Amino acid sequence: MRVVVTDVSVFFDLFEIQVLPEFFALEWEIHTTDFVYNEILQANQKEVFEVFERSKRLNILKFSSEEEKQVRNFKTRLSIRSIADKTILWKALQLEATLLTCDRKLRKEAEGHAIEVRGSIWVIEQLVENDVIDSTRGISLLENLKMTNNRLPFDLIDKLIRQWKK
C-alpha cells in the first residue's frame, strides 16, 4: 500500500475541483500533520476533511513536545521556515512516504532528501490509472484545475489531456 503525506496545497486543489471522495477512495494510507490540518480554516472545508478523518481515511499525525522540538531543529538546505512544511517533510522521511505538495521550494527540498514528491496533477493521473474515475472525468478535472491553480505546469496538464483524448 502506498503511503502518502500531503500538504494543504494539494488538499485545497482537490477540494476546489470537488474530487476529495475519489482521492480518499484510493487504496493509499493518507497522512497529514496536525500543523497542516490546522491550516484548514474555512468551516465548509473543515467539515469535509473531518468526515475523512472520522472515517479513518485521513490520518492526522500529532507531535509530542520532543518531536516538535526535533522538527523545529531539523535543518533544511533551502531554509524551510514553515513549521507545517517541516512537519510533513520530517514525517515523509520517517515513514518513507511519497510527499504530496504543489509548493516548488518544498518539492526541491524533499527531492534533496531523496523523497518521492508528487502533486495534484499526479493525483488525478492516479485516479484514472487506478480506475477510480475514467479519462473523460480526468480531463474535466484537469481543465478545472487549470482554472483554480494558475501556478501549476499547464504544459504538463495539456500533455496529459492530449494523451487521454487519444
Image (spheres, grey):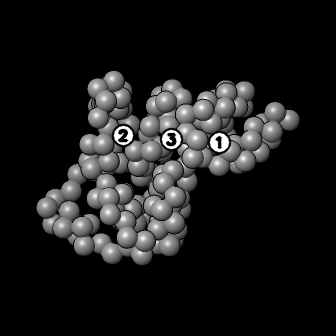
Badge 1 crowding class, 10 Å Cα cut-off, few under 14, some 14 to 19, many 20 or more, is: some
Question: Which element carries disc 3, helix, strand or loop?
Answer: loop
Q: What residue type is labelled 2?
A: Leu
Question: For residue 139, which quarter of the picture?
Answer: top right
Mark in the foreground, 3 or 1:
1
- Can you name the residue that lies furthest to the front here? 150
Q: Can residue 142 be seen in this view?
A: yes
For marks 3 and 1, give the CA distance.
14 Å
Q: Which circle, 3 or 2, is nearer the viewer?
A: 2
Q: Which residue is drawn at 44% across and 39% down?
A: 11
Residue 6 lies, in percent from the top left, at 42, 49
Residue 1 picture location, percent across and down: 50, 50
Q: In this view, does 120 lie to the left or right of 87?
A: right
In the rendered view, would you say 43 is above or below 106? above
* Residue 151: numbered disc: none
Badge nearest the viewer, 1 or 2:
1
Task: Evaluate if marks 3 and 2 touch, with contact meaning CB atoms under 8 Å apart.
Answer: no
- Judge by depth and name the residue closer to the eye, 45 or 49: 45
Q: Name the residue under label 2.
A: 58
- Residue visible at 20% across and 62% down in the picture: 68
- Residue assigned mark 1: 125
Where residue 30 sits, quadrant-wise, is top left
Q: Mark 3 points at which residue?
A: 27
